[in-house]
Structure formats: C-alpha cells, structure tokens
Image (spheres, rainbow, N blue to C red):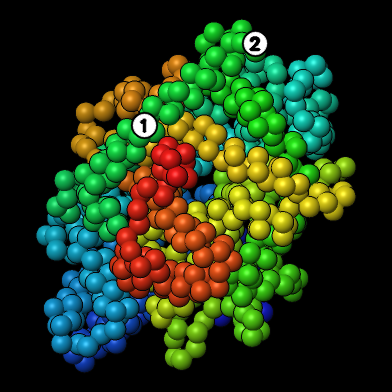
Amino acid sequence: MNILLKPFDSPFKTAPFSKIKTKDFLPAFKLGIKEAKAEIDAIINTTEEPTFKNTIEALEFSGEQLDRISSIFFNLNSAETNEEIQKIAQEASPLLSEFSNDITLNEELFKRVKTVYEAKEDLKLTTEQETLLDKKYKSFSRNGANLPEDKKTKLREIDKKLSQLKLKFGENVLAETNKFEMLITDETDLAGLPEGAKEAAKQMAESKNKAGWLFTLDYPSYIPFVTYADNRELRKKITLAAGSKSFKNDALDNQKIVLQIVNLRHERANLLGYKTHAHFVLEERMAETPETVLKFSNDLLEKAQPAAKREFKQLENFAKKLDNIHHLEKWDGSYYSEKLKQKLFSLDDELLKPYFKLENVINGAFTVANKLFDLHFEEINDIDKYHEDVLTYKVTDSKGNYISLFYADFFPRPGKRNGAWMTSYKPQYIKDGENSRPHISIVCNFTKPTKTKPSLLTFNEVTTLFHEFGHALHGMLANTTYPSLSGTSVYWDFVELPSQILENWCYEKEALELFATHYETGEVIPMELVEKIKESATFHEGMQILRQLSFGLLDMSWHGQDPSKIKDVKAFETETFKRTTLYPETKETCMSTSFSHIFQGGYSSGYYSYKWAEVLDADAFEYFKEKGIFNKTVANKFKKHVLSQGGTDNPMTLYKRFRGQEPKPEALLKRAGLIKA
C-alpha cells in the first residue's frame, strides 16, 4: 500500500518521511487526482439545489489528500531534492496544472458556484464565508471559466507549459549554484577573512577530499568571502559567478526560459481579458493596479535616490583613500561597506557573531513569541524528519493547548536551494467541530558549526531567522474555518507584515538582552554594541532601498507591459536598471536569469510587496514602541486582528482594526533616516 494514500498513522498525523519512497509520489499524485475528481463529481451530480454548504464548502474541503501529497513533495523539492525528485516534479506539475484547469474550466461546477455567488445577498453569510465565496468565484472567473471552448483549450496549454518552465528555471539555478567551486590553495589569498569562514572553507574542502579551502555560492560561504577577502581578483571571480548564474549560453541557461515565461504570462492575461500579467495579478492585491505600484515605487525612489547617491559617493571616496581604488565595482561594494561601517561605528559582524550562537537566537525568537503571544516551544524527537539537521518542536499556549508543530532546517546542503523561506506541511482549518492545527516549517542557509565553533550567526542572519519566524507565527496562530483562507493565505503585499515586523525586535535592547549572550563566557551583549547596532541600522539605507526598488521595478517591467518585442534579456534588464544603478555595468552578469522569486516562486508582479509591507511594519512597530515592545494589549490586538485572521477579510480592514488607522509612510522614512524623527 502506498503510504501517501492513507491517513498518516503518526504523532499529530505528521508526514512519515522515513517511510515514503520517492517512487511513491507519482502514483500517489495520479490516485490523489482521481480521488479529488470523484469528490468534484459528487458536488456536480447531487440533485440538491446549489447551496453554500454543498457547493462552496464541499469544494473547499475537496482534494485534501492531494494537497497533503503536494505540500510534502514540493517542500522536499526545495529543501532536499535530487535528480529523481526533479524528474517526478517535471512529470507531476503538468498533471496538477491540468487537474487545476479541470476544476476551474468545469462548466457544470462553475454553474453551481455562480448560482450561489449570485444569491449571496440573501444567504446571511459570515465575513469569512463571504470572502471564501468571493475567492471561489474569482478562482473560476480569473482562470477562464467564462471563456469559449477554444480559448479554454489554449489556457490549458499555457498553464501546462508554464508549470514546466518554472520548474526548469529553478533546477537550472540550483545546478549552477552547486556547480561553482573556488578552491584556494595559497593561504595568503585568504587574507582578511575571519577565522570562522576559513575553518568552514577548510571543512568544505575536506568533505570533498580536496586540499585547501573551498568556497561556493551558498550564502554562508559566498557572503563572508565578498565581505572580507582582501584579494580583489578572487572577490571579482566569485561575484561574477554568482551574478552570471544561468547566463552562459549553455545547457543551464535561462534566457530563453525567461522570455518564454513572460510571453506566456502576458498571453494568458490577454486571454482572460487583462491588459498585462501585472494587471491580472494586482487585481488580488492591496495595491490593486500597476499604476499604484509604480507611483508607490517612484515616490520612494525619489526620496531614497539623493541619499543613495550621497552614500555611494562617500563609499567611493573611502575606497580611493584607503586603497587607491578609482572605480568602485560590484565586487567592491560589500567589502568597502563593511570597512566603512567598522570605521564609523567600530562595529563588524565578527565582533557580534560570538553573541549570536544559533541555538541562543532560536531560543530568543521563542522567548519573544512567548512574551508577546504566550507560546511555548518544546523540542520533540518522536516525529519523522526529512533530514537529520531538521529540528522539530511542539508548540502550545499558556494553558497547554496544542497550537502547532514547527520544523526548523538551518544549514546549506547540495539538495537545498539558496535563501530562506517559510512553508507549511499542513494548514490549519476547522472541520466537523475540530480545529485541525498546522504543521509549519522554516528553511534557512546559515553557517554550519565547525570542529571548534558552534553555528555563529551574522546580524543579518539573526534578522533573517526572525523574519522567517514571523511568517511561521502567522501560520501557527491561524484560527480560521477554511484552509484556503488560513495563515499566510493572504494578499502577497500583506504577507510580509508579520515577518518584517518581527525583525524590529532584533534592534531593541530589551529583546537582545534575552538571547544575545557570548557563546563562551555567557556575558550579555554589552550595551555599547546594542547602541552601535541601532546606530548602524540606517547605514547605507538609501542604497538598500534603491536596491530593493530596482528589483521591484525590474519585476514590473517584465510583467507590466507587452513583452513580445523583448529579444535580449540582458539589454532589457540594463535599460530597466538605468535609474537605480550605482555600480558600473558588468557584461558577464544578469539578474533575471536567476531571479527565482519572480520566475520560479510566486512573486511575479509582487516583488514591490517587500517595500509595501515595510510601510505597514514600520507603522505597526511604532505602535508597539509607543506602548512598550512587549505590551500585551498591543500584542493581543496584533494576534487577534492580523496573525489569527489569515485572509478572512480585506487586509486594510484587518490592519485598521489592529492599528486604529491606515498606515503612514512617514514611519518607514523616519526609521530609514530619510526624514527627521
């Protein structure tokens, strides 16, 4: 019996990773689709008149087993993949895409949904039920239900191709990341690097039976090298390798894939009656239109640009004075920024890292969650893991009630994509009177422990952990009836609020004192270091904002116009970056070919949302600061109106219930140091 096709007989009904064989997945997908289709048929074939319960709710809870199989499989494809899993992904994705179309293009089913939708005024629905009905109706209308038959067929073809292209894009980027190795055999080439980075590189070389120090494009290896290595040529080599991923006109090249994806997305949007892919996507976002996004981005750009240019000029002068560097290049940015930061604030990551032992930071995040939301985290070892590095926790409230399971996966490995993300293995929902609790996971790529040191995080890694943990809290504290409205199932320009607001605690003395202790002496982080962290928080903020805006504007350029005339990915990108570029152009690099957020993940026409949510988080945290960063009243309001509500209501309505007003952009500009507090 295929273990994926029966209810999991495991603690908390967790995924039984050790019992799942990779070959089980494809048959499970096929059978899961068959079962889900039978559930859809039952909805269509009932002789009863369409009601909210027998149509909308029945549709919402259909395909539960298939959803479970999909979440397990695609999470593994991101965090613990191999060739066999990637091959199955290429086979399964078109099947799932086809099944999704079978639902949204099913006329009989749409007829029933439409009947309920048109009668909604008389149904006395709750706000959550109204939201679900609206979402279900739009899932049909926005996916071709009103199209004639020939256009429905065309839509199916496009969706099938897109699902395969997105997978291929991601596989190419991962293969490129894994392929690059820079072996250093002369110790003088390591000048400037911290001991921890050298030790990790030596360990990496040993693990591959090589003599010397091995550096890769995984962030814990790449970032210290470009930040600290004195050897400018080697910094250039690794920077160009990172910037030229899938841009080499070889088997792993993504240029054609990028053009195919944007053209297919545009064609799909036109087919559905939208001007561009961005118009289609933004209809379901807080921003609503590309015009709003561009106005928001350009207003912020106008305010950040003068600061960014000043900061860049200061950095150029500093590099010139220090090392007679006349033209600052991309491979110089992190290196001289770090040196300048050290000079201005007497602060560098190596000074801070001993206070940020990974285990202490995890416990710090747990303590903050406990003080704010009364959550308790207990490490448990009786549930299955997909890799030995994964940590597992049972989450309870102050009364001992079970809230969630939490998986944490912190270190890089060959089968894991770069970056950091939160995901879920099982959503929260209420069915038959039972509140079924979620299984939430965060995945990061932090520095591994070495023979002599534990995993010590840079301050940037500390904020990354808190960021992903903020997303996790959004998932764990979900308390809604329907799975598709639960947890992080919200508008994408709202989803970053819980993650970004939590980063703020990393800068506060009251929070840092809870977990920032020296891994050897146990000494609490000295107050002068806390002050320096706060002082340096706005260091090069203009350049940082410019960088984020440049990514968002590139995304909108790809998706906010007809891309059919674009023939050269690099030339298009260079033109788009003109207003936001500070460093000289490098012909070898191209960002689009490895911009996984928009070409593999779900951020197409949505990358602006990081900055959009920063306005929300700065405004929200100002409220906490007014009342006290661990103020229970404010925390309870945030939990009640934001974290537990998922996508049950309009995000601005939820925000105003918490804050009592709409967010003010001034809070972000103040925090960034762009206007006076």
Question: Disc 1 to disc 2, how far (Cα)?
Answer: 41 Å
Q: Is residue 89 above or below residue 236?
A: below
The percent coordinates of residue 342 (x first, y second) are 67, 29
The percent coordinates of residue 442 (x first, y second) are 59, 58
- Left or right, 61 with respect to 12, comes to left
- Few, some or many residues within 10 Å of mark 1 (<14, 14–19, 20+): few
Q: Which residue is mark 2?
A: 323
**What kind of element bears circle 1?**
helix
Q: Foreground: 454 or 252? A: 454
Is label 1 or label 2 in front? 2
- Left or right, 20 with respect to 597, comes to right
Q: Which residue is mark 1?
A: 256
**What kind of element bears circle 2?**
helix
In the image, what residue type sits under mark 2? Asp
Q: Residue at x 70, y 23 (%)?
A: 229
Q: Residue at x 58, y 78 (%)?
A: 403
Q: Is residue 108 above or below residue 466?
A: below
Q: Is residue 327 above or below residue 133?
A: above
Residue 427 in sight in this render: no
The percent coordinates of residue 337 (x first, y second) are 59, 26
